[in-house]
Image (cartoon, helix red, strand yellow):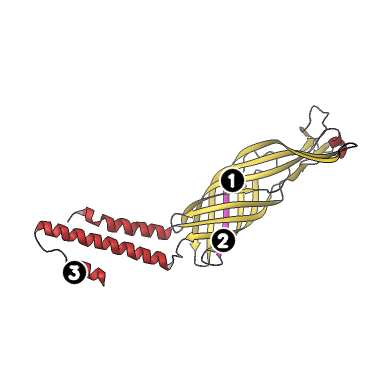
Amino acid sequence: MKTYRYLPLVLVFGLKLANAQNELNVAVGFGAAQDSASGRGINGNPNSANFFGTCTPGSSTTCSPSNGLSGMMMGFRGNVMLWKHLGIGGDVSFQPGKQDYAVFPSSAIQAGGANLQSRTTFYDVDAVLQPIKTKRAALSLLGGIGGANLKFYASGSVSDAVLGTQNFSQVYGSSNHFQVHGGAGVDIFLTNHVFVRPQFDLHYVPNLTQFGRNAVTQESIWVGYRWGSEQASKAQYEGTVGSLRTACLWFAATERIAADREGHPGHQHFPRLIER
């Protein structure tokens, strides 16, 4: 008997089994990230050759200390579980609003200077391990690499007798960094599809000189939706059975044709068993 007669049955069964293990989930998250201040000052005197350069805090009225990373973060994440306990994923987390990085006296702003604001973004691609997974919850461990982007804005407000008070903000520049990402979260399934995920993340960003540490911590609450996994619907089950039935009928037909060619009766009972 030739092996190729079994291929349709093996392929259909293998595809259905693989599909039953796949899971796709997407989520939106809200939280906060923290890093300490660098301890360095920024020169806000627009008439100085060292404008926006480093200085010693307190050395002059226009030398202001830089702030650390703080404030609200939001993000978007997606995971694909290729096997029951292992998959891949990726996310982007960013500050939806700008935060003050260095604030200078109003006299410096009126003289043509500006305050500095910042906005931080993290993005990464991870391996996802779920060593513990039940119908109600799953522990997710994340590890991967990505990047960090710090964008800076020159902003402030000026007043004059003609135009009154005007606010301004423009991009001053940006800094890109490599990062190594790790995280841990617990998926709590509210329904078969909807879940919430408290998660802790650690972003290790080498040479993150704009802040005090290379390690940035982040805490988030994610709300998401998932498809697939072991929550197969009745329709999926019936589709699998139907596909296997079709493959078996095809197998029986090839057996009958092969038997006729060899000059002896085929397995007439096999189709009748499937029809029951």
Mark 3 vs mark 2, foreground winner is 3
| Residue 181 pos. (x, y %) | 57, 47
| Residue denoted by label 1 | 123
Please, what secondary structure does the residue beneath circle 1 have?
Answer: strand
Q: Is residue 191 magenta?
A: yes
What's the residue type where badge 3 is placed?
His
> In the rendered view, does 57 fall on the left or right side of 133?
right
Residue at horizontal 62%, vertical 51%? Answer: 75
Q: Is residue 63 above or below residue 144?
A: above
**Residue at image x 33%, y 59%?**
13
Q: Amino acid at mark 2?
A: Val
The local secondary structure at tag 2 comes to strand
Point 22% across, 67% down: residue? 271
Determine if the magenta segment contains residue 143: no
Residue, x 37% and y 67% (percent of image)? 238
Residue 138, horizontal then vertical, whole percent: 52, 62
Q: Which residue is mark 3?
A: 269
Q: Is there a contact, CB below 8 Å, between mark 3 and mark 1?
A: no
CA neighbours of label 3 inside 10 A, class few (<14), some (14 to 19), many (20+): few
**Residue that label 2 marks:** 186
Return the residue nearer the eye: 77 or 255: 255
Q: Which residues are magenta?
A: 182-192
The picture places residue 142, in percent across and down from the top left corner, at 54, 52
Sequence-wise first label, 2 or 1: 1
Q: Quadrant of the C terminus?
A: bottom left
